[in-house]
Amino acid sequence: MGLPFQPVPKPTHKRNKPTAKQRGAISSSVRQQVNIRSQDRCERCGKHISNVWTLEQAHIKRRWTMEGKCTANDLVRLCGPSSDSSTCHHFADYTRAGREWLVEFQTKLLEEST
Ligand SMILES: [Zn+2]
């Protein structure tokens, strides 16, 4: 016979970390800060203006890699929709160069805010 069945004991602690969804949630004040910072333009191309074009707030880091709360420094306002391959949101989310651009952009944000 093999080894006796040894189930792993269930963890007794409660979940104390917020879920990825909760961490990724953007509060209205954070949204406002990003809107002010972006001056209602796409923060990459600067061409597309809110109300004329779809601007979307994109997470710089993937939700599940973030720690703590989402702040204005975790967001960038880009022209969208991301499903349109000619937009900055698509570039940022789906291309390697875009991910690199996001990291650079955030580095600048963090330098400016310190
Ligand atoms: Zn753009």
Image (cartoon, rainbow, N blue to C red):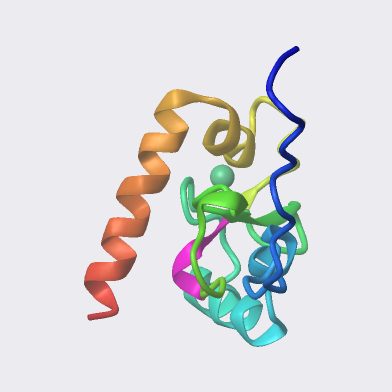
- Residue 52 is left or right of residue 30, and the answer is right
Residue 35 sits above or below residue 52 on the image = below
Screen quadrant of the C terminus? bottom left
Q: Nearer the viewer, residue 34 or 69?
A: 69
- Residue 68 is left or right of residue 18, and the answer is left
- Image point (62%, 71%), residue name: 17
- Image point (51%, 59%), residue name: 66
x and y, in percent, of residue 101 in the image: 38, 40
Any magenta on residue 76?
Answer: yes
Any magenta on residue 54?
Answer: no
Q: Nearer the viewer, residue 100 or 39?
A: 100
Q: Nearer the viewer, residue 1 or 58?
A: 1
Can you name the residue that lies furthest to the front here? Answer: 1
x and y, in percent, of residue 67 in the image: 49, 65
**Ligand 1 positioned in quadrant:** top right
x and y, in percent, of residue 19 in the image: 70, 64
What span is in magenta?
A: 72-77
- Determine the image quadrant of residue 113: bottom left
